[in-house]
Image: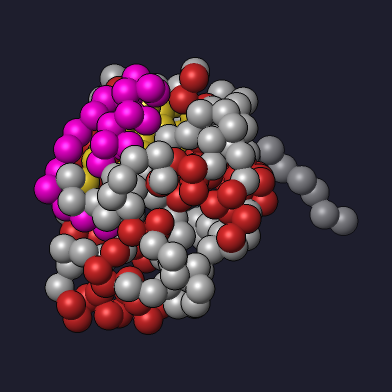
């Protein structure tokens, strides 16, 4: 017959001491992970916002490569979801659904047509704390992308053959001016065309009515006339910065673009 004997007091004390030391070790290990979690904390004490980058027409998310590297180096979580380019309502709904998967504050950035998309996708989302427009459309309700580009002279989109062929005709001179010819050729080969309806669809209630905005204007932009960008930026009461660049300042001037995004991100705290 097996007999269960009580452990001597000395042995019990040893067991208790071992358990205490094990728990202390776990707590010490947990404390060592705190600095890693603290990387997500904003300088003001709140959480760092997530940065979401929306590309425009005749482009893809790789346009943001320079900004993504720099923002990640500053400790930000960055996403650059693909823009379907199938129509303003569809594109905005796609982005709006993506934004709903993110908890915490968001800085939403749009380039060119991406400005139309973020203006509509952010409406009603309380997590979006800042809008940043990079050579972008900043539409009011009822505005269309085509209407805004044609409101003032200077846009190459107004040429008679602008939408007669895919890929986009005159890409290097119109869309990628200011970039080296070899780089413009690569971009032209990888361009993604936009549905015609995306440029003609009217914009909805603009998110910039309730969300602070920033605007970077390329003074050599051949797609959206700088004068029209200035008008839209002033109408939205945006913080405005000018840069000597063409329409693709996000590629030619990634440091300048990143600085604007960081300014918006820091202002969210």
For the N terminus, give its image quadrant: bottom right
Q: Is residue 109 above or below residue 184?
A: above
**How far across and down, in percent of the image, does residue 155 sit?**
33, 52
Q: Which residues are magenta?
A: 226-248
Relative to 86, residue 98 above or below? above
Q: Is residue 157 left or right of residue 263?
A: right
Q: Image point 34% across, 20% down: which residue?
A: 237
Q: Position of residue 174 (x, y in %)?
A: 29, 64
Q: Quadrant of residue 26?
A: top left
For image coordinates 19% across by 81% down, the residue present is 182
**Foreground residue among 24 and 57:** 57
Residue 99 shown left or right of residue 238 in the figure: right
Up-down relation of residue 166 to residue 64 (above or below)? below
Q: Is residue 84 magenta?
A: no
| Residue 136 x %, y % | 37, 44
Q: In this orientation, which residue lies closer to the viewer: 241 or 163?
A: 163
User: What residue appears at the point 37 percent right and 30 percent down from the top-left corner?
Assistant: 232
Where residue 138 appears, x then y in whole percent? 43, 35
Residue 31 seen in render: no
Residue 230 is left or right of residue 255, and the answer is: right
229 in magenta: yes
Between 197 and 53, the one lying in front of the other is 197
* Residue 235 visible, this angle: yes
- Nearer-the-camera pick, 154 or 29: 154
Residue positioned 58% across, 37% down in the render = 203
Q: Quadrant of the C terminus?
A: top left
Total numbered labels placed on residues in the image: 0
- The furthest residue to the left: 244
């Amino acid at each position: 017959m097996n007999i269960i004997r009580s452990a001597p007091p000395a042995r019990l004390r040893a067991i208790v001491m071992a358990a205490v030391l094990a728990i202390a070790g776990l707590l010490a290990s947990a404390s060592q992970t705190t600095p890693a979690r603290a990387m997500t904390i904003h300088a003001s004490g709140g959480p760092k916002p997530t940065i979401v980058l929306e590309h425009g027409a005749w482009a893809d998310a790789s346009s943001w490569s320079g900004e993504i590297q720099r923002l990640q180096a500053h400790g930000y979580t960055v996403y650059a979801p693909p823009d379907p380019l199938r129509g303003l309502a569809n594109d905005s709904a796609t982005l709006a659904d993506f934004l709903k998967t993110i908890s915490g504050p968001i800085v939403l950035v749009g380039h060119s047509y991406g400005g139309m998309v973020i203006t509509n996708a952010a409406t009603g989302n309380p997590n979006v704390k800042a809008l940043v427009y990079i050579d972008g459309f900043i539409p009011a309700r009822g505005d269309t992308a085509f209407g805004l580009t044609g409101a003032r002279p200077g846009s190459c989109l107004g040429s008679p053959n602008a939408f007669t062929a895919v890929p986009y005709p005159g890409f290097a001179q119109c869309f990628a001016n200011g970039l080296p010819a070899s780089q413009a050729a690569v971009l032209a080969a990888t361009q993604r065309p936009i549905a015609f309806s995306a440029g003609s669809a009217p914009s909805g209630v603009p998110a910039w009515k309730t969300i602070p905005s920033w605007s970077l204007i390329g003074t050599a932009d051949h797609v959206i006339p700088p004068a029209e960008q200035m008008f839209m930026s002033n109408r939205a009461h945006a913080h405005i910065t000018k840069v000597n660049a063409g329409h693709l300042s996000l590629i030619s001037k990634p440091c300048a673009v990143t600085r604007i995004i960081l300014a918006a991100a820091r202002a969210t705290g």
